């Protein structure tokens, strides 16, 4: 575990806002196409006395945006270059053909942190992940470096968030001769597999417990991703694990 993990201070909000954010996270994980108006309505149904301005602000803090054509709360830096989407009509047929990355919110007692992961599109294998208490690009670049120590993709796909359009992130990919692909704004299926990863992480790990602090979050997520890669069977992979598919290991044995 990196030493800096022990010194993370979870980003803070008022106790009420943290409760609202936890509810927002659950609603968004189930209905990722909800924008702030429907989010506000959903929270009011849960007896939260909130207005749309509070919901919009907290969604920005959490890095949430509706994956449908609408106003986007995931704002790219206008000074950063935006790359075209390269996966349309592309047949992804092998590991290390396409990697992808994204960021999600994780609640921690008294605050929250952000999780990023790098995943192989074909095998669903999680190559690297990192936590941060801010949405700066540094932790995304750190996860990318760790992933590149294990291989090199032909194409790397992300959304247009400022972390992924930063010179540090795109420069690392270009130095490794990786083609850069970016989702169209508000397009819900451009990075669908890592959205499904976040749903699995939330329902199979995060929502089942309350993380006391960041070191516990780091340990428990590490154990989860180990199970996810090497033990969890995926129906879409023919009931094989991501590791089996990524490293092309056979699941049958000879008599």
Image (tube, helix red, strand yellow):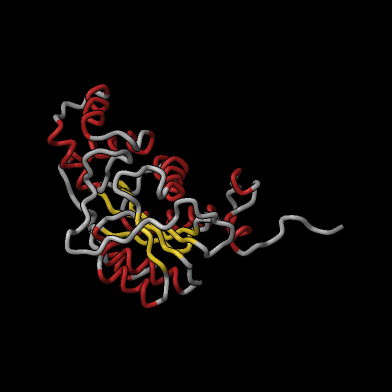
**Which residue ends up furthest to the right in the rendered image?**
255
Q: Residue at x 32, y 38 (%)?
A: 68
Seen as rendered, the residue at the extreme front is 89
Above/below status of 16 relative to 217: above
- The image position of residue 99, as x and y in percent, is 46, 61
Q: Residue at x 48, y 53 (%)?
A: 224
Tell me residue 169's x, y (percent).
31, 68
| Quadrant holding the C terminus | bottom right
The front one of 50 and 35 is 35
Say which of 101 and 225 sits in front. 101
Q: Quadrant of the N terminus?
A: bottom left
Q: Residue at 35% of width from left, 52% of height from top?
A: 183
Task: Specify the farthest residue to the bottom.
Answer: 175
Q: Is residue 71 left or right of residue 205?
A: left
Figure disc tally: 0
Quadrant for residue 230, please give it: bottom right
Pinpoint residue 179: horizontal percent, then vertical percent.
41, 67
Q: Residue at x 30, y 33 (%)?
A: 34
């Amino acid at each position: 575990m990196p030493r800096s993990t022990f010194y993370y201070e979870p980003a803070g909000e008022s106790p009420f806002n943290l409760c609202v954010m936890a509810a927002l996270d659950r609603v968004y994980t189930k209905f990722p196409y909800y924008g702030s108006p429907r989010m506000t309505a959903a929270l009011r149904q849960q007896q939260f006395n909130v207005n749309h301005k509070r919901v919009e602000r907290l969604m920005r803090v959490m890095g949430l945006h509706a994956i449908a054509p609408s106003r986007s709360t995931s704002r790219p830096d206008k000074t950063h270059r935006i790359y075209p989407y390269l996966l349309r009509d592309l047949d992804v047929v092998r590991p290390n053909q396409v990697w992808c990355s994204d960021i999600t919110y994780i609640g921690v007692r008294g605050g929250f942190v952000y999780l990023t992961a790098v995943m192989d599109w074909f095998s669903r294998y999680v190559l690297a992940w990192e936590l941060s208490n801010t949405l700066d690009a540094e932790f995304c670049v750190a996860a990318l470096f760790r992933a590149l120590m294990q291989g090199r993709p032909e194409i790397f796909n992300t959304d247009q968030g400022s972390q992924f359009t930063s010179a540090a992130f795109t420069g690392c990919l270009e130095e490794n001769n990786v083609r850069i692909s970016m989702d169209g704004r508000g397009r819900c299926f451009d990075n669908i597999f890592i959205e499904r990863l976040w749903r699995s992480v939330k329902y199979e790990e995060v929502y089942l417990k309350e993380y006391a602090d960041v070191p516990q979050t780091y340990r428990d997520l590490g154990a989860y991703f180990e199970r996810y890669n090497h033990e969890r069977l995926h129906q879409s992979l023919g009931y094989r694990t991501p590791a089996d598919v990524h490293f092309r290991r056979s699941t049958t044995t000879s008599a």
